[in-house]
Amino acid sequence: MNRKHFLSSFIAAATVLPTFKTFANIIENESSAFKIPPYLNQGDIIGITSPAGYITMEQIQPSVVQMQSWGFGVKVGETIGKRDFTYGGTDEERLTDFQQMLDDPNIKAIMCARGGYGLVRIIDKLDFTMFRRNPKWIIGFSDITVLHCHLARNYEIASIHSKMCNSFPDDWTKAEPIQIETILSIKNALIGEQIAYTAPVNINNRIGKVDGVLVGGNLSIIETLAGSHSDLATKDKILFIEDTGEYLYSIDRMLWNLKRSNKLKHLKGLIVGGFKVKPDDVGEEFGKTIYDIVLEKVKEYNYPVAFDFPVGHQRNNFALKCGISHNLNVSGSGSILRSL
């Protein structure tokens, strides 16, 4: 979507590297049971691995250079450059690489190199025993929604929904402002900066102000995890959703699944991000917009709904901390989401 339709506001200046903080091994969020991994300090190591799709060493280089410029060390996993058809290596190779990063005490955050498909094939074989003792930030979106949902459901450990290595600009000096802002939002999330994101007025928004733990991600992933060990619990949460490459009728069907499984019934609030929709086939027009589809499913509930939020498969895809308490304020002036 066009950048002019969105606004982003950082409480701390995004272009200045803020003072790094020291925290206890695990910080308990006072308003939830979620555990917050330690925020990163200069010199901490970020691991890069590809638990889903294939990516080359050359393609991740801009992200390596940028994260090093922030003061972090980088450890590149064995799956980078490996390929098994569409995957970043075989299931066993991707499982082994991710497990090593989960267990390595020197790695303080794990950035998934790209999305695609493949995490659901290995999620049940991952051992989170050491990770639970010493949580670390897991970063990514799209197919990485599998991990966000799995961590929320089973371990109540916070994670970061954001762009990945394949979204870092090749030349930082020539990057568009929106690219710089979204990439810097990852750094700000990792070092514990309080953040605020805004979206413009939309006539379909539902007004309201609520506090709640933020969860969500890719709609199709959330829907396909229903009934599994990674099924996302949404009661009393602020839920955000986004998707790409789906027909309108498919989005309608997925949201009916969320409604029928009561995932929309007890929300504190709903955030609707970017939806890149496939054009209807000629003669098979669905006849409803994204706004129609969503509002139909939530019309009997009273919580606020914010449309056109800067999250999803689009350039203005800002880092969101899943499992962290946020304030969502939807008003006649637009929407704003603040971490608490």
Image: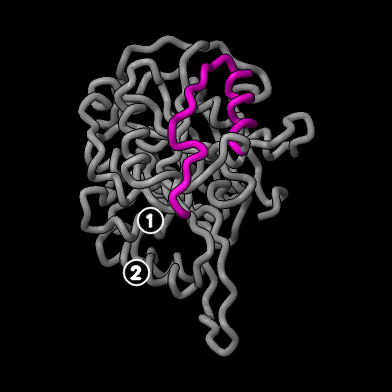
- Residue 208 in sight here: no
Kindly state the secondary structure of the residue where label 1 is placed. helix
Few, some or many residues within 10 Å of mark 1 (<14, 14–19, 20+)? many
Which residue range is magenta in the image?
59-85
**What residue do we see at 57% from left, 35% from top?**
57
Q: Who comes first in sequence, dot 1 or dot 2?
A: 1
In this view, the residue farthest toward the bottom is 283
- Residue 136 in sight here: yes
State the CA–CA distance, disc 1 to disc 2: 14 Å
The reply, left or right, for residue 158 in relation to residue 53 is: left
**What residue do we see at 63% from left, 18% from top?**
69
- Pointer 2: what residue? 256
Q: Nearer the viewer, residue 16 or 116?
A: 116
- Pointer 1: what residue? 221
Q: Quadrant where the N terminus lies?
A: bottom right
Tell me the amino acid under the disc marked 1. Answer: Ile
In the image, residue 65 lies in the stretch drawn in magenta: yes
**What residue do we see at 62% from left, 31% from top?**
61
Relative to 140, say whether 135 is above or below. Answer: above
Q: Position of residue 184 (x, y in %)?
A: 61, 29
Relative to 206, say whether 55 is above or below. Answer: above
Relative to 118, say whether 96 is above or below. Answer: above
